[in-house]
Amino acid sequence: MRALTIAPGQKNSIQLEERPDPQPAPDCALVEAVALGVCGTDMEIIHGDYGWAPAGEPRLILGHESLGRVLEAPSGAGIATGDLVVGIVRRPDPAPCPACAAGEWDMCRNGRYTERGIKERHGYGAERWLIEPEFAIKVDTGLGLLGVLLEPTSVVAKAWDHIERIGARTRSWRPDRVLITGGGPVGLLAAMIARQKGLETHVFDRNETGPKPGLIADLGATRHGGDIASLKDLAPTVVIECTGADEVVLGVMSQMSGDAIVCLAGVSSGGRKVDFDVGSFNRTAVLSNDVVFGSVNANRAHYQAAADALAKADPAWLARLITRRVPLDRWREAFERRDDDVKVVVDFGRL
Ligand SMILES: [Zn+2]
């Protein structure tokens, strides 16, 4: 089979190479790849800034946003031949820590978790892969290729789950106005869930042209461009920060008001210093019971919530998120950034 592999830590080592087919294992399902989504983490891994190969191996099979069709599954596994499935990315650490022991590997406490296509486990960027049935999520067959959006949706489903749990510290808490910063796939999917919850939704994104303004408008959300400081009177009760950009993170943290919950969901590169009025931040946060928290990854319950959210969404809107579908033979194009990209997927030609 063909697989997309990289040598971790080596810039631009990505290649499509011939690998032996996975050996069927009695407790695993064998899956043929249908599509693979490309995200910022993949680009960091390709640049040599992130990623770890499995112990004792020089290369890592890339890819964590999967969609595949089951070829064979153990009986009683809950998935069967022909099902469309998405593989969960993270696996609990071997210790396991109390979080992993409770199935909440997204909250792993010791950092010894592994992740397919990212950390010490081969990913889903191969024509065939094995999956333990308990780490496979069945996707509504009607979704077809759109099922590849399940993994990024799981990340925002987790963010929403934690926002609501934090909100529940106040019995009267009802979110009304939501601000999402960043109109990439994660921001747009976070906004989609906000709209499914019936919330007034604002998206801060500087793109005036391309597909993003239309995608935001068609959710029934309002787009804001320009400077984040211009949103200081918006007073959202929930902010989901998806850019990781210093000035945007700073903007949302300096503008919190009235029991706001700010979820930081974008990863910054770090290393740049900016002016930040710690005293004002502290004063506002204390006096209005604000919360700023970080959110990463997702556990099985979040993948399930994401599957439900995708099933409820308008398929025509979801289809517009996938702005390029690159055949495996032309895989290099999938890892080039283009102006109007939202989500790019590698298409394995099996749908
Ligand atoms: Zn753990």
Image: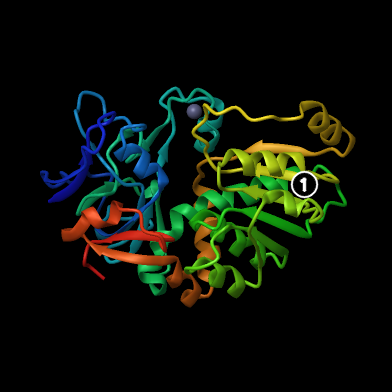
Residue 58 placement: quadrant: top left
Q: Nearer the viewer, residue 329 or 55?
A: 329
Q: Nearer the viewer, residue 69 or 264?
A: 264
Q: Residues within 10 Å of mark 1 (few under 14, many from 20)?
A: many
Q: Is residue 221 above or below residue 181?
A: below
Tell me the residue that label 1 is attached to.
167
Residue 33 location in percent, x, y?
25, 57
Amino acid carrying mark 1 in the image: Gly
Q: Residue at x 36, y 31 (%)?
A: 49
From the viewer's perspective, tell me whether residue 34 is left or right of residue 230.
left
Residue 305 location in percent, x, y?
55, 57
From the viewer's perspective, tell me whether residue 145 is left or right of residue 351.
right
Q: Is residue 145 above or below residue 67?
A: below
Q: Residue at x 51, y 68 (%)?
A: 209
Q: Nearer the viewer, residue 130 or 114?
A: 114
Q: How is the image coloured?
A: rainbow
Residue 112 location in percent, x, y?
43, 25
Q: Residue at x 36, y 59 (%)?
A: 344
Q: Secondary structure at mark 1?
A: helix
From the viewer's perspective, tell me whether residue 269 is left or right of residue 335.
right
Residue 312 visible within the image: no
Residue 140 location in percent, x, y?
42, 68
Residue 277 visible within the image: yes
Residue 177 placement: quadrant: bottom right
